[in-house]
Amino acid sequence: MWQLKTIQFAKCSVHSIIFRRLSVSDFKLSTNRDSKQFSVKENESFMANIFRRSLVPKQVFPYPDVLSLEQKESTCSLIGPFERFFSEINDAAQSDESGKVDEKILSALWELGAFALQVPPNFGGLGLNNTQYGRLCEIVGANDLGLGITIGAHQSIGFKGILLYGTPEQKEKYLPKVSTEHVYAAFALTEPSSGSDAGSIRSRAVKSDDKKYYVLNGSKIWISNGGIADIMTVFAQTELVDLKTGEKKDKVTAFIVERSFGGVTNGPPEKKMGIKASNTAEVYFEDVKIPIENILGKEGDGFKVAMNILNNGRFGMGATLSGTMKKCIEIATSHANNRVQFGQKLKNYGSIQEKLAQMSILQYATESMAFTISQNMDNGSQDYHLEAAISKIYASESAWYVCDEAIQILGGMGFMVEAGLERVLRDLRIFRIFEGTNDILRLFIALTGIQYAGSHLKELQSAFKNPSANLGLIFKEASKRAASKVGLGGCDLSSHVAPELQPYAKKTEECIDLFGQSVEVLLLRYNKNIVNEQFILNLLANAAIDIYSMVVTQSRSSRALNLNLPTAQHEVYLTKALTIQASERAMKNITTATSRRHQNLTEKFSIIARTVCEKDGVYSTGVIEV
Ligand code: MYA
């Protein structure tokens, strides 16, 4: 009989952001007879559910297919003009060199509607849904990431808050400006002392005595479009009074700030490693008077507004980088097809084949993730945060690998500016850092999933205190566990994929099953202290990422087979190869996460890192010193 120890997630006194992550927000307490009963907010996210060893296929199987014929046609009608813009008007290399985008190029983009892809037509935009938007992001990513950031910082985060949270009046006032009037937008969250720890911002807005406006003071750094934006979504601390207790508390509030309010200035464009064409600058706010009607969302809800804007835009990065990878693969393939060394074309060598195959697998998975998420969002799902974070990590790391391997295939030529890949590699580096560093997002994935699993364990724990009132829940859980003893684990992925892929789905099932079991073991072992186990959390996040890559590709290639698409067999090969690699890696990571032997290694990591920090760097006797 399995035992449930007390699992307590309290909003404990925080000394790290990760501590704050585990809260009891997902638990609703209600009194049932003499026992307190927990009812957990159900979540339809595929990935959240695997943390509790539950398979909720809806978001992934069958592969979502949201676009109507009309939407497909209207997207296709935009693809031609976008591609023409990049081949005939834009000059990525020139913008990279000059560190800015030429006005003529920007004007052409405004003409195309590229700055308002998702704004409803009645406000001057193209009214695209997420999937249509993603398709155009791919084209941008294939051609110019620097320009992509100018476009993306404007609409993916700059004014996205107005689309998501704006009042009818705010939409009426601002959306036409940012869609058609050549007014740029920016998202101003990061501050000198607040990067990954977004909740710790210091900019402050104080309400006037007549309560008609706020006065904002503070500064923001590394703001994309910060030097060119006239409208900004700005986050600042505001004092709120708890109406029940009268207690005063600082909470973040989001504001729409116009440069024309006065007191908004910016520093010079930052000198960067890549995405040089995009403008990045510090922004300063000095006694900026913001009318009260420019609060975005509710007072004090700014942190959630910021998180949801970021969640909402992350899949766009996946779509964009899927396009970048396509272009890198094209360049590498063309070289492999033509270059002769040792009497053979490069394409005939196993080591080049391995690279090209690996690059194609990563591109396929990245694209499958991005468009599974976009279509879930278009279907109205609200539970896509974990998947969006996974797709951002996967896309940014895969694109880096793919571009690097493309350079390797080209050899010396790849290192030359002319090949066009060195700029892409420089541009790509930031994608693992901004919109949430991959490190912080890995912890976000693991802890959010664990929190969800933990809430279910807590629900069970509560049920056991009053078994007669909770028989249904207990039997459901007991039969799931009994099934797992005979190896079924309650999971059945095989029925969702094409017959040819069933053995591969079986491998994924095994991963999901072991993953859920391991999360439970870890929760029971560490209780709330799991938040301190970052080595373990990273292993879980990596396994989750691999699992998501398997299910989205299995789903997409099953669809290709079912529709008898000409690419189906190739997609099946990509999926099979990916599943072999990803399932092995996931199994290893999951097993390592629960193995006590792994602690032996991580303890050493901690000791080494502590010494290196104490000594301010490398600490060993030099080779010639005695
Ligand atoms: S913009 C700057 C990006 N900055 C970041 O991403 C900051 C990263 N940090 C964080 O995300 C947060 O601080 C973390 C949580 C995650 C670390 N969704 O106590 P908490 C809720 C929904 O755990 P913390 C840039 O780079 C949570 O449930 N809710 O928070 C521009 C809790 O709720 P409750 C969330 O420990 C780049 C509350 O918040 C989320 O402080 C330009 C507090 O939680 C979430 N994710 O930190 C890009 N997280 O109180 C251009 C937390 O109810 C892009 N919560 O319990 C262009 C690309 C596309 C190109 C397109 C071309 C066309």
Image (tube, helix red, strand yellow):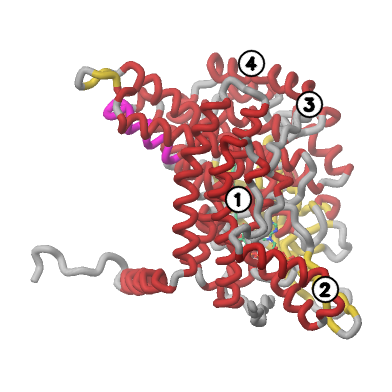
- Mark 3 and mark 2 residues within 8 Å of each other at the beta carbon: no
Q: Which residue is mark 4?
A: 80
Instruction: Sort mark 3 into few (<14), some (14-19) or many (20+) by Cα contacts within 10 Å.
Output: few
266 to the left or right of 327: right
- Mark 4 and mark 3 residues within 8 Å of each other at the beta carbon: no
Three-letter residue code for mark 4: Gly
The answer for how far apart the CA atoms under marks 4 and 3 are is 19 Å
Label 1 sits on a secondary structure element that is: helix
Q: Which residue is mark 1?
A: 389
The quadrant of the rendering that contains the N terminus is bottom right
Q: Which mark is residue 68?
A: 3
Which residue lies at the image location 51% right of the left edge and 41% below the top edge?
269
- The residue closer to the viewer here, 280 or 581, is 581
**Mark 4 or mark 2: which comes first in sequence?**
4
- The residue closer to the viewer here, 228 or 466, is 466
- The residue closer to the viewer here, 594 or 168, is 594
Residue 317 in view (yes/no): no
Label 4 sits on a secondary structure element that is: helix
Task: Return the x and y of residue 625 as percentages of the image width and height.
Answer: 10, 68
Label 4 vs label 2, nearer the camera: 2
The answer for how far apart the CA atoms under marks 3 and 2 are is 45 Å
- The residue range painted magenta reads 400-414
Which residue lies at the image location 69% right of the left edge and 64% below the top edge?
480
The quarter holding residue 184 reads top right
Which residue lies at the image location 72% right of the left edge and 74% below the top edge?
458
Q: Quadrant of ligand 1?
A: bottom right
Q: Which residue is mark 2?
A: 471
**Mark 3 or mark 2: which comes first in sequence?**
3
- The residue closer to the viewer here, 235 or 394, is 394
Which residue lies at the image location 53% right of the left edge and 34% below the top edge?
364
